[in-house]
Amino acid sequence: MVFRSDEGVGLRKKLLRAERRKKFEALGLIAPLLLVMLVFYFVPIAMMLFRSIDNSQMARILPQTSEAIQTWSGEGLPDEATYAAILGDMKIAYEEKTLAKAGRRLNFDLVGYHSLLLKTGRKVEQIVEPPYKETLIALDKKWGDVRYWTVMERGLKDTTMMYLLAAVDLRYDDDNKIVKVPEQEAIYISIISRTVYISLSITILTLILGFPVAYYMANAKPRTRNLLMIVLLLVFWTSLLVRTLSWILVLQNNGVVNNLLMFSGIISQPLDLVFNRFGVYVAMTHVLLPFMVLPLYSVMRAIPSDYVRAARSLGAKSITAFIRVYLPQTLPGIGAGALMVFIQALGYYITPALVGGPRDQMVSYFVAFFVNEQVNWSMASALGVTLLILTGSLYLIFGKRVNIANMKLG
Amino acid sequence: MSNKDYHVRFKNVQKSYDGKTLVVKDLNLDIEKGKFVTMLGPSGSGKTTCLMMLAGFESTTHGEIVLNGKPINKIPPHKRGIGMVFQNYALFPHMSVAQNLAFPLEVRKFGKAEVEEMVKSALDMVQMGAFIDRYPGQLSGGQKQRIALSRALVFKPELVLMDEPLGALDKQLREQMQYEIKHIHEQLGVSVVYVTHDQAEALTMSDQIAVFNDGIIQQLASPADLYERPENSFIAQFIGENNQLEGVIEKTNKNIAQVKLKNGEKVSALMVDVKDKGEKTLLSIRPERVVINPKASKNSQALEGKVLELIYLGDHIRCRMMVAQNDQFIVKVPNSSFHAQLKEGESVKLSWDKNDCRALKP
């Protein structure tokens, strides 16, 4: 029998063994949240993202065609077998009432496809013997148009880039090349840039309004500071919807502000303060202000007053001391606050939907529009993906410069 | 001495933060040009407030501060031309050492070449020339302190204020910096107002020490005077170690009083701030001025003392005794070749020069 000496185990192994318990404990503490996040956050998001490229339902509706069209070279019309396959598929799909779904999907790529499929579907019963190709073309000459077959082939693949391309105003042309959509149809790029523009404006507004407040709070007596903190956090105590609706009450044509201005004789006609861009700015700045103030405040509190005093004693005017000594030290707070406000503003939905006009709607509005009105989950998630990529790249660019530690609230 | 030679004068200065209590009560202090004056006192005694009023960061509630013969109450801090060293150094973290030092010169619109030269010589003065491109975060406490010092001096102010600048350093470094600051002061001839609560630091560095307590200056004196001739019982207790004996004045002869102690023994003492017969007094005697088993001499007097505890401290032996009902009476017996050999429990005779025994108001 040989006893193993301690040296045999190795220091690293011993350390790992000693720390293992700690690791399990740590894991135990975060496991519940991790699980919840996984099931209710990451999985749905991943599924949502997948929706933007998923196209597998088409192959399920038109299985024979999907198989037969693989032999097609893309030049000229497909062979008789492919026509037979689509005829067979349409027969079944018409009975199962899934043909309209396929029609809508193909119509998205090429307008006219929906009616073509439905029209053919109604008459498909009557076609019982070959030649199917000629019969179909006789029924509707679109079946003899190569464009329709190009779209069909593209539409039967398991994944498609069509929605993602559409979300940035791009599409496939007849030769399967990616091109810009005609100018009168292009809307998403302008919506995305509008979203960025509004978010940027809100960020600047919250910075202008929040900086002095944070400065005052950081330098106030504890009692005043606590009171201000409560007032600031009061915003979180009421629901977003209530806050937004009360802005409508305040800003509408016979609302508080207009009544006051008209009563005092400053204006004779009510001003348009809501259901336009102005309303969006007011309401969103109000809602997002705490997210600017809190990181600023926490950074400012950590700056000792001695710095400004030192600058003053060294001969700097108060404005010089502020710009050259104080302001640079608040940059981490400005960065953290701006990033938080900007990223949140990018995804805002309720507030602009309620207090904005039609020309003030942001990307999220169109996500909701595609889900609720169009039942086009793919397009909704494609817009979601653009938003996510926008946010993610911003975070990668600026997040590194802004210490995450400064993102804490208070 | 004419008014002009005073660099700084505090005239009846008062300061209140809350409108109810005075943090500084009727402060009068004259600081001569080129002197190193220390404001010493326990925390909350008003010394830092005085410094901040002089720098211009706090307003005076009442009274006047005069700098070079001109009242400065209404002059903003940046126009006072006073250099200042802060306790936490206050080096701007986003600027390099060179930028920190250039800051006071740039706001004064010095030329680029001039700035460079002045920064270099200010850094050389504190032997920090090699650190010119570092950032404050890359420096040790002692190095930051030197940079802060040279930044306060780079624009050649005539007056430099220091607010506990060595408070955050360890003991050894602190002592080294004390000498260094003292030497720089001597070299440049600037006036320095230094705030500290460390009396050893104050005694080491200062030309004059103003001891603060309770919002007033208890005594303004040179280190030697402060230690050897305390003017009241606060100073006697605050500066160094002192034995205290309670008693009542029995009779007076010029400035010498005969005091009857609690146990009936009588001693002579120098009257400092007491004068009347029958007045209660606190006698204060330094532990190192007590002589054990003396040879008779006309200036000395003998008291009975019982040895309670002996502590060996190398260079001296610290002996706690019971003297006139005070069991905290300390005598320092120097560890010389002829020193008295004491044993615990033994009774000995103690004496001192009557001028070393100061009768103060309790």
Image (cartoon, coloured by chain):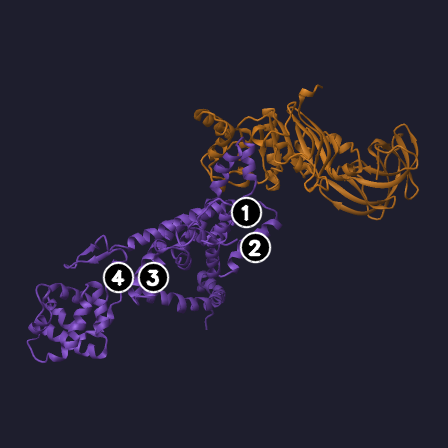
Chain colours: A purple, B orange
Whether pointer 2 and pointer 4 mark residues with C-beta atoms closer than 8 Å, the reply is no
Tell me which label, 2 or 3, sits earlier in the chain. 2
Name the residue located 57 percent from the left edge and 28 percent from the top edge. B79
Observer able to see residue B145: no
Whether pointer 2 and pointer 3 mark residues with C-beta atoms closer than 8 Å, the reply is no
Question: In the rendered view, would you say A270 is above or below B47?
Answer: below
Whether pointer 1 and pointer 4 mark residues with C-beta atoms closer than 8 Å, the reply is no
Question: In the rendered view, would you say B56 is above or below A11?
Answer: above
Whether pointer 2 and pointer 1 mark residues with C-beta atoms closer than 8 Å, the reply is no
Q: CA distance from mark 4 to mark 3?
A: 12 Å
Are the residues under marks 2 and 3 on the same chain?
yes
Q: Residues within 10 Å of mark 3 (few under 14, many from 20)?
A: many
In the figure, is residue B310 to the left or right of A33?
A: right
Residue tagged 4: A163
In the figure, is residue A81 to the left or right of B22?
A: left
Q: Amino acid at mark 4?
A: Tyr
Read off the chain for label 3: A
Q: Secondary structure at mark 3?
A: helix
Residue tagged 3: A367
Q: Nearer the viewer, mark 1 or mark 3?
A: 3
Residue tagged 1: A301
Q: Secondary structure at mark 4?
A: helix
Residue tagged 2: A230
In the figure, is residue A173 to the left or right of A324?
A: left
